[in-house]
Amino acid sequence: MNYNGHDIKVVWVDLDDTIIDFTANARASLTIMYDNEPLLRQLYPSEALWAETYERHNMTLWAKYNVGIIKRDFLRMERFRLPLTEAGLPDAEARTVSKRFDTLYLDLLARQKRLVPRAMELLTVLRTKKVTIGVLSNGFREVQFRKIDSAGLTPYIDTVVLSDDIGINKPDTRIFIHAMKRTADADPTHHLLIGDNLQTDISGAINAGWSAIWLNRTTVTAPSPACPDTAVEVHNLYDIIPLLIL
Ligand SMILES: [Mg+2]
């Protein structure tokens, strides 16, 4: 398949908020937790405040996790411990509850099915082309395969490479090299990544010598950070299809 003058053999997609609507699925999971956990209703007067507090801490922790400042187990403890202690729960109890919430939340998340608009159409078109389709994700092993399955994506995905496999996250070039090894194609010009995160996905792919398409889901009126010259920016997954030539 030709893309932008390159002979693409492998199309990699980021999973969360590129194919799977992680933001909506995560929010739905947090809402279910609030409805089912009396403790959360004691600590937080509204579901919105609970979800916003969790999301604020989670976002900060993920920014540190993506660049390797903190480890996954620390992130998974802190993203629930911090909202619990912030609302007044004693630390020891918050740690115990955080472990239970971690299991509960990841299980709820794995059951959600919402996709990013036009994701299925893009994957259906890619499936008709002579390319390998891979997932390249910083998400956790316990849930990424279940999420792919719940969302009905299994028939469209040939290979899944997770940062969890080697303990190295995007944008580190080593995970892109690991992904090329997995597909037995070490020529970076044969690889294209589609992702929503300018730092982890787009910079990472460009630095590895891959082609990159940035899915910018923010509205056109909002100022967005500059997309690198070597990457292409789209606002809708369907806009990628005309760029791919069989
Ligand atoms: Mg993403």
Image (cartoon, helix red, strand yellow):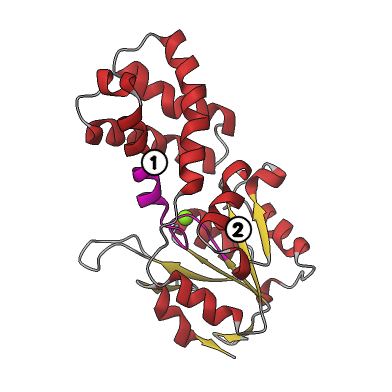
On whether ligand 1 comes within 8 Å of the CB at mark 1, the answer is: no
Q: Which mark is residue 136?
A: 2
Name the residue that disc number 1 marks: 29
Name the residue rendered at 45%, 34% in the picture: 61
Badge 1 marks a residue whose secondary structure is helix
Taking the magenta stretch, the answer to whether it contains residue 216 is no
Q: Which residues are magenta?
A: 13-29
Q: What separation in Å lies between label 2 and label 1 (alpha carbons)? A: 23 Å
Name the residue rendered at 68%, 78% in the picture: 9
Q: Is residue 228 visible?
A: no
- x then y, percent, for residue 88: 30, 13
| Quadrant of the image containing the N terminus | bottom right
Q: Is residue 46 left or right of residue 207?
A: left
- x then y, percent, for residue 137: 58, 53
- x then y, percent, for residue 77: 50, 25
In the rendered image of this protein, does residue 178 appear above or below residue 7? Answer: above
The amino acid at mark 2 is: Leu
Q: Are marks 2 and 1 in contact (CB under 8 Å)?
A: no
The amino acid at mark 1 is: Ser
